[in-house]
Image: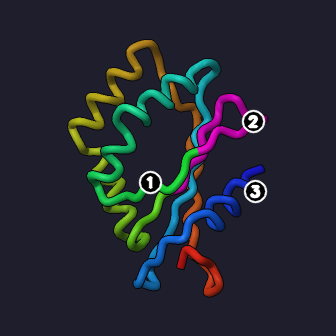
Amino acid sequence: MLKKLLLASLLMTTMTFAADTRIYELRTYRTLDGRLDALMTRFRDHTLRLFEKHGMENLGYWVPEDQPNTLIYLLGHKSKEAGMKSWADFQKDTDWVKARTASEVSGKIVEKVDRVWLSPTDFSKMK
């Protein structure tokens, strides 16, 4: 399922980037039971905008049909170093801290996060 999602996102995106250092980040968030809606609300209302503010490009978001407590998304970065800096800046952003704190008033949301850094092949449309 994850491979199909990734392939679909790579095939559907036709953006052209000049630098060979362009990299993508595939993230999978597993929420505690019943907390996916809270996570999606936080992303919809705050997180996407804050990602863009810190130089992260929102490319796609999915909920697997067979994994009800899971959100999978793909971000684009100028380089891995730029992506790491964007994450560090994002995590210190006071707007993010406020949004996260407010969204967790009823309890913790995210149980586990997985990250995979992806470099496009020489024949990829996303290169």
* Residue at horizontal 38 percent and vertical 72 percent from the top: 78
* Residue at horizontal 31 percent and vertical 60 percent from the top: 55
> Disc 1 to disc 3, how far (Cα)?
19 Å
The residue carrying mark 3 is 4
- 66 or 33: nearer the viewer: 66
Q: Would residue 41 be found to the left or right of residue 117 on screen? A: left
The image quadrant of residue 100 is top left
- Verify whether residue 73 appears in magenta: yes
Q: Would residue 29 be found to the left or right of residue 43 on screen? A: right
Q: Inspect the image, locate mark 1, and give the three-letter code of the amino acid beneath it.
A: Asn
- Where does the magenta region start and end? 62-74
Classed neighbour count for the residue bearing mark 2: other residues with Cα under 10 Å, few (<14), some (14–19), many (≥20): few
Looking at the rendered structure, which numbered label has been put on residue 84?
Answer: none
The residue carrying mark 2 is 65
Q: Secondary structure at mark 2?
A: loop
The residue carrying mark 1 is 58
Q: Inspect the image, locate mark 2, and give the three-letter code of the amino acid beneath it.
A: Glu
> Disc 2 to disc 3, how far (Cα)?
12 Å
- Do the residues bearing badges 2 and 1 touch, measured as CB atoms within 8 Å? no
Does 52 appear above or below 33?
below
* Residue at horizontal 40 percent and vertical 58 percent from the top: 57
**Image coords of residue 86 (percent x, y):** 32, 58
Q: Would residue 35 be found to the left or right of residue 67 on screen? A: left
Q: Would residue 3 be found to the left or right of residue 108 on screen? A: right
Q: Secondary structure at mark 1?
A: strand
**Image coords of residue 51 (percent x, y):** 35, 50
